[in-house]
Image (cartoon, helix red, strand yellow):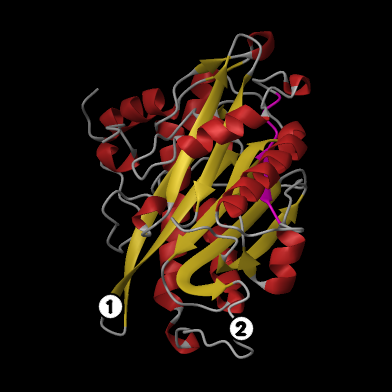
Amino acid sequence: MVGQKRIGDYGVRIGTLPKGRLNKITDVKGVRVGHCTIDTEENKTGVTVILPREENIFINKLVAAGFVLNGFGKAQGLVQIEELGTLETPIALTNTLNIGIVHDALVEYMVGECAREGVHITSVNPVVGENNDSFLNNIQNRAVRKEHVFAAIESACEDFEEGDVGAGKGVSCHLLKGGIGSASRVVEYGGGSYTIGALVQTNLGLLEDLVVGGRHIGPAIAEKIGAEKLQEKGSIMIIIATDLPVSSRQLKRLCKRASVGIARCGSYIGHGSGDIIIGFSTGNTIRENDGNEIRSIRVIDESRIDPAFRAVAESVEEAVLNSMVTAKKVTGYRGNSRETLADYLEEYLKIERGES
């Protein structure tokens, strides 16, 4: 077990639905997450890779969907997901100027994976998302290389680290340290239990707007540290995974509810923000060239979808807060630094309890 102190360990409860075993996106069976972190004086960045299933995903595609809440972003692979409604590669997250390099690495990875199974591919749709981490990272160095992507894939596991790791190393959230965060919820359908999990790369929001579990604590922290008054420009990448059997259209509806989780933390999704949600379901497999002209998939009753909406909203809200409290203070490029929410949250909660 990683053993990091997460938002629930501070006594902050988000929502009402039960959590998954690890309270991470990897509570969806088969999903794994890996990081590779670059941490030098000049570069604070990296790559995070979400592996959606254990089998070769190009041969065993998954139902997928995407939703662009605000489009000031450079994500790749969304066009084909929108058109076909399927996912055929892992999903990688990195910084803005490393999108192309990471895309190329995923192509190489998938070519190799398919070659091992005797599958010759001439087209593949890598999915890559990004945040601009240039406040803490000399982004022009384009420090993330192919070997870092492969290292992240190699390290993929269920109980992965959160905070200032991988693609979360150099990002900021509500003008504090952001990072990678995750959470999950369990819902009941047809007498069975299903999991909905979220993973976020957080780089958005103003400190004065920050809300933690319904407590508007941002202004007090902003006053204490003298936070600058800025226009919101940041971004967030959100990955939603579930084993709930849904269509691509239904999955897109789930993705849209991620906006509720962002808003509950205080972001209003500013003009300069790239807020992009990508979802996939392991509840149906679309097998490549299986010879069937007619395919059958299972989907939930549309009129019963509300618990899944709630699960997405709660998971994203908690994932954002987990990304912040697990991140340590980071000083990076040009001496710029971001404080950790954990230090100020402890103090705020003590005051609230009358302990200081």
Above or below, comparing residue 285 to residue 209 in the picture: below
**Gap in angstroms between the C-alphas marked 2 and 1:** 31 Å
Q: What stretch is highlighted in magenta?
A: 125-134
Instruction: State yes or no: residue 130 in magenta.
Output: yes
* Percent coordinates x, y for residue 86 in the rendering: 63, 68
Identify residue type, mark 2: Gly
Above or below, comparing residue 350 to residue 263 in the picture: above
Residue 97 horizontal side relative to residue 178, left or right: right
- Evaluate whether residue 233 shows in this view: no
Could you tell which of marks 2 and 1 lies nearer the N-terminus? 1
Identify residue type, mark 1: Gly
Q: Which residue is drawn at 66% across and 27% down?
A: 144
Q: Residue at x 72, y 18 (%)?
A: 138
Quadrant showing the C terminus: top left
Q: Mark 1 points at which residue?
A: 192
Instruction: State yes or no: residue 34 in magenta.
Output: no
* Percent coordinates x, y for residue 210 in the rendering: 51, 40
Above or below, comparing residue 51 to residue 167 in the picture: below
Q: Name the residue under label 2.
A: 291
- Label 2 sits on a secondary structure element that is loop
Residue 231 horizontal side relative to residue 11, left or right: right
